[in-house]
Image (tube, rainbow, N blue to C red):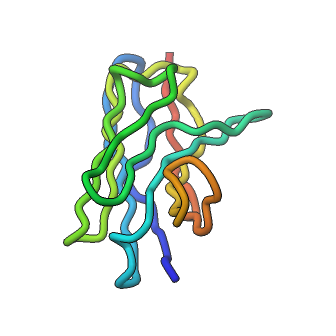
Amino acid sequence: QVQLVESGGGLVQTGGSLRLSCAASGHTFPDYHMGWFRQAPGKREFVAGITTGIGVTSYADSVKGRFTISRDNAKKRVDLHMTMLKPDDTAVYYCAASPVGPSVAMAYWGQGAQVTVSS
């Protein structure tokens, strides 16, 4: 079993940057694909994902070139570095773990971190 705790959310101006971190517990963390999702009123979407092993990354078109996902298996942590933030990025961000893939069949979820981008 994996427990996930996000940190690093907050309020930032348009064009600013934030780094979200997701700390995981459980010795099987390296075996899980990891993803970041976000929930805004009326919609929930995949943001970024990273696989097990060599860590292949994937991104939603809306964040490509602006967000970077990374993982550190030794520290049991996955980060989302967000740059050039826009008001449309405002949402609650969740990290999630899956034994299948970085954007599907997510088995474990964190509690979420609020990100607010002011215009």
Q: Residue furthest left?
A: 74
Is 60 in front, or is 66? 60
Q: Position of residue 45 (x, y in %)?
A: 64, 37
**Residue at horizontal 31 percent and vertical 36 percent from the top:** 68
Q: Position of residue 97 (x, y in %)?
A: 51, 63
**Residue at horizontal 36 percent and vertical 40 percent from the top:** 57
Q: Is residue 17 left or right of residue 36?
A: left
72 is higher (above) or lower (below) than 9: below
Q: Position of residue 49 (x, y in %)?
A: 44, 45
28 is higher (above) or lower (below) than 72: below
Q: Residue furthest right?
A: 42
Is 116 in front, or is 34? 34
Q: Position of residue 98 (x, y in %)?
A: 54, 62
Residue 106 appears in which quarter of the rendering? Answer: bottom right
**Residue at horizontal 50 percent and vertical 15 percent from the top:** 119
Is 8 in front, or is 26? 26
**Residue at horizontal 36 percent and vertical 31 percent from the top:** 67
Q: Is residue 9 left or right of residue 47?
A: left
